[in-house]
Amino acid sequence: MLVTAQYAGVVSVAPADSSELFYFSMERKEIVRLSYIAISLLGIPGNILTLCVILSSRHMRRKPFNILLVQQAVIDGCSCCLGFIGEMIQPSYSPDLDIFDSLSCHIFFSMYVFWCLITASSYNLTAISLERYLAISRPLEYDEETVLHRMPWVMASVWFGSFIVLIPDAIFANFVERECVLYSTLSHMGLVLLDVYYILSLMMVPLLAMVFAYAQIVRSLQQGASSFNCNINSTGNRVSLRKAQINIIQTSSSLSAFFLVCWISFWVIAIGNMFFGIPLQPGYHITTILLLCNSCINPYVYCIRYDEFQNRVIMIFRRIIGSRSSRSHTESSVAISTVPTTREAHKNNSKKTQFTI
């Protein structure tokens, strides 16, 4: 079974003894290509906004949660940029297939870097979930300074882990009839084992960690005073606790559900193709687009629902509007002050007339 690895165009699948590849019509290719481009362009501004808002505040960029949000925005922004770039260029190899063609196949056209970024996004979401779990479920053990000291290790582990986990994609990409093809040298059993490995490392580990973290968060919020070590006797505190509980439940359930839908649908299609011969198209592109959507909506889900982020955005826009209004007011004041009044103009004209006489 051969899988050609390309961004634009086709990800083709065929039995090893057949030279005829399943392919998209030109109309479907264009629809898929435009979908990748539209989603990528939608995700880039949201991630840039996240970076600008958090990094512009010294108070916000000191918090561990916000540091992970910055990394999430960098990862998701790079995913969207690479998805857009991948649709803008077509594979072009030299006649002799030199070392640069080999590197481009192993790293870029195999979609190794793209999938590393998608994986890093899910791993970073897992790190955010665990950080929130420690902050809410274990407040007495949570020391912000200690977390800040180990944050570089956590961030490096997200990047390093994603690139290491997906190294088989870079290793098993080869040229077959001048096309960059994934897993062409693997046997059927090798492909099955690789699928199991990817299901566990890319989907099950992050999903179980996120479900565990958010389940513990909900449990801690339900426990109330014993979890937060605070007094909730007053009605105001009860209302605030209830709002925080509902917000956390809604956010965690929506993120977990979307994560689950994206990855399970992807692996259902892959396993169906592997064991039952179900065509990989168009399901592969649909589920890949869903995974790219995950990178696109992450800044909106995590940041637009984040009260401190919202307040910072409002403050930035007020400053922009205020600076423009004060600038226009200053310019109008200067213009008014430079125009002489009617009486001053009459006096000046009288002086000119007397001097002429």
Image (spheres, rainbow, N blue to C red):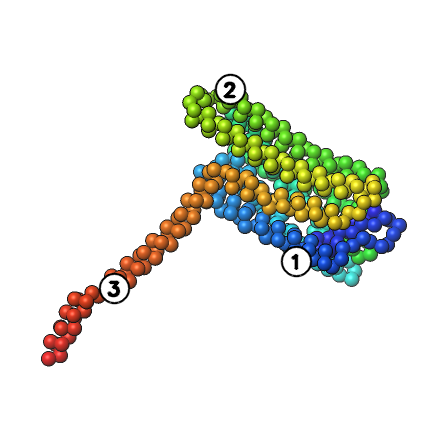
Distance in Å between CA atoms under marks 1 and 3: 55 Å
**Are the residues flagged by discs 1 and 3 in contact, CB closer than 8 Å?**
no
Q: Amino acid at mark 2?
A: Ser
Label 1: few (<14), some (14–19) or many (≥20) C-alpha neighbours in 10 Å: few
Give percent across and percent down for residue 293: 63, 46
Q: Which residue occupies 11% across, 76% down?
A: 354
Give percent across and percent down for residue 228: 49, 23
Q: Which residue occupies 18% across, 69% down?
A: 345
Q: Which residue occupies 76% across, 55% down?
A: 24
Label 3: few (<14), some (14–19) or many (≥20) C-alpha neighbours in 10 Å: few
Q: Amino acid at mark 3?
A: Thr
Ranked by sequence position, the earlier of labels 3 and 2 is 2
Secondary structure under badge 2? helix
Is label 2 or label 1 in front? Answer: 2
Give percent across and percent down for residue 131: 56, 31
- Residue position for label 1: 88
Ranked by sequence position, the earlier of labels 1 and 3 is 1
Ranked by sequence position, the earlier of labels 2 and 1 is 1
Q: Please name whichever residue, 59 or 304, is drawn nearer the observer in this view of the structure.
A: 304
Task: Single out the residue that lies furthest toward the bottom.
Answer: 357
Image quadrant containing the C terminus? bottom left
Distance in Å between CA atoms under marks 3 and 2: 69 Å
Distance in Å between CA atoms under marks 2 and 1: 55 Å
> Which label is found at residue 237?
none
**Are the residues flagged by discs 3 and 2 in contact, CB closer than 8 Å?**
no
Using the image, determine if residue 143 lies above or below residue 111: above
Residue 188 visible somewhere in the drawing: yes
- Residue position for label 3: 338
- Residue position for label 2: 226
Label 2: few (<14), some (14–19) or many (≥20) C-alpha neighbours in 10 Å: few
**Would residue 232 be found to the left or right of residue 7 on screen?**
left
Using the image, determine if residue 103 lies above or below residue 125: below
